Structure formats: C-alpha cells, structure tokens
Image: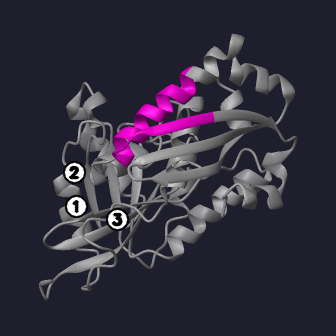
Amino acid sequence: MTPSDFRAGFIAIVGRPNVGKSTLLNHLVGQKLSITSDKAQTTRHRVTGIVTDEGAQYVFVDTPGFQLKHQNALNRTMNRTVTRALSEVDAVLFVVEALRFDAADREALALLPKSVPVVLVVNKIDRVRDKTALLPYLEKVSALFSFHAVVPVSAEQGRQLPDLLKEIRTCLPTAAPIFGEDEITDRSERFLAAELIREKLFRQLGEEVPYALSVVVDQFELAGDVRRIHASVIVDKPGQKAIVIGKQGEKLKRIATSARRDMEVLFGGKVYLEVWVKVKSGWADDERLLRSLGYE
C-alpha cells in the first residue's frame, strides 16, 4: 500500500558541462546509467534514473551541459533537450562545482525556471582542501537566485546524498508512484549499450575525436540472459575511422571489451559484442540523420 503522503515527481539535473551531473545521477540510483568521462559534454541524451523509497519516487532527468560555443545541429538538439526537460519537471537540481562559478555557470543559471523549486547542489566538496572557503562561496552563489535549498555533496563519494533526497522530497507533489518500485530507468537496454560504447570511446581516444563520433546499435538479440549486440561507431572522416580502429584493430578491440564488461554488469548476463566503424560525413549537422541516431 502506498502511504497517503507518498510523493512522486520528475527532477531535472542541470548545470554547465563537467560539473558531475551524470556521476550524481549514477550514485543516486546506485547503477551506472549515465556515462561519464573527464571530458566535458560527454552526456548528449536525456537519461532518466528512478529512485524509489518508502516515502517517495524520484524520477531524475540527467541532461547535457548547455552548449553555447558550437551551434551545429547536434548541439542545438542537446540544448532543446535541456530546455524541454526544464519545462516538464517538478523540481530542478542546479549543480555547480565547489569554489567555482564562471560564465558558463551564469549562462546555465539564466535558464533556470522560476515556476518550480530549484535546489543548489554544490558538488565535489571532497576536493576542497580549505573547508573554511566553502561558507563564503555558498553565500555568494545563494544570493544569485531564490533557491529552495542549498546542499553541498560529493557525488563521487556519495556524501550527503540522503540529505539531498530529503530536500528534493519536499519539492515533489503528493502522488502515487509513476514507475514500478524495481524500475531504475525508462531507457532501453539497446540505448544503454550504445551509451556504454560511447563512454569507452570518450575515455580511450584523444581530445577531439570523441566529439566527432556517435554510436548506433544495429542489432540487439536477447536469448535467455544472453545478449548478442552489433553496433556501429559513426565518424565524420576516414582519418577518424583509422584512429578509432587503431593499429591492427587493437584500440577498437580494447574499447569493445571494456564496454562489454560494463554491459554484463548492468544487464546481469553474458554479452557478445561486435563493433564496426562507419564514415558518415557531416552527421553532426544533419537533423534527419541525428533523429535516426536517437537524438531527440
């Protein structure tokens, strides 16, 4: 039986690139749903993570970092994803990095809605050596917007996340659960498989190449607890294809092996994974092709 004061709702996680939004989502849910790397703008899609406890169901929506520098079709699509998420939620987590607040943070702050509660989440407090610097920083940022609450956390270490959930619960409407209590995402395994491959590409390639590629799952077959997955890495130029494949195919093999291991942990079963690389010039500025690759 759901208690009469049970709460449920959608919460957008927003902020500039690389403040730890995806890490926060993954630690809140307790599963790796949103991919991470030390490169900015790793997240490109709207990723939903669901947390259900005895008093509430929190449906978190991880969003790409809002991008103003490069206005190709891909980045316009990602920006629409952020804007749409902000218009469809019951609360917002505005994530910043402890002791840092720059022009990109201000640009993200300007997008915050006035119609729903916004919780300021100050992440990466574990990296702050001088803890006495935190209070003046919190006071400074808090003065910039009418925040519902301010919660310092370490998403990476899971510190103060229960406190964050308590604050979020006060923002949510009284309602029955939206999803089943065992569900952790509304995204398909097919989508998650493509994202895990893309994460390994971001982590194992140089600075520029990951931004010039995407991943599509061409075939996904499930027999019992065994999954057979065929995927393609889409790149913009033939030279990028050679970089992804590496000498005698070794780099692509490492990427696929690492992605397969993560898939087996997430899906709880054996995975057979094959990955190819294909050249599709101009894919990041082709709205029709982006839709076919799963961009909203």
Give neighbour class at mark 3: few <14, some 14-19, many 20+ (Cα, 10 Å): some
Closer to the chain start, of discs 1 and 3, is 3
Q: Position of residue 53 (x, y in %)?
A: 17, 67
Q: Tell me which amino acid carries mark 2.
A: Leu
Mark 1: amino acid? Leu
Q: Give x and y (percent) for residue 169.
A: 23, 71
Q: Is residue 275 magenta?
A: no
Tell me, for residue 179, which label it has, or none: none
* Residue at the spot of label 2: 161
Quarter of the C terminus within the rendering = bottom right
Quarter of the view holding residue 209: top right
**Label 2 vs label 1: CA separation?**
6 Å
Residue identifier under label 1: 165
Question: Is the Cβ of the residue at disc 2 closer than 8 Å to that at disc 1?
Answer: yes
- Magenta stretch: residue 272 in it? yes
Instruction: Judge whether 89 appears above or below 237 on screen.
Output: below
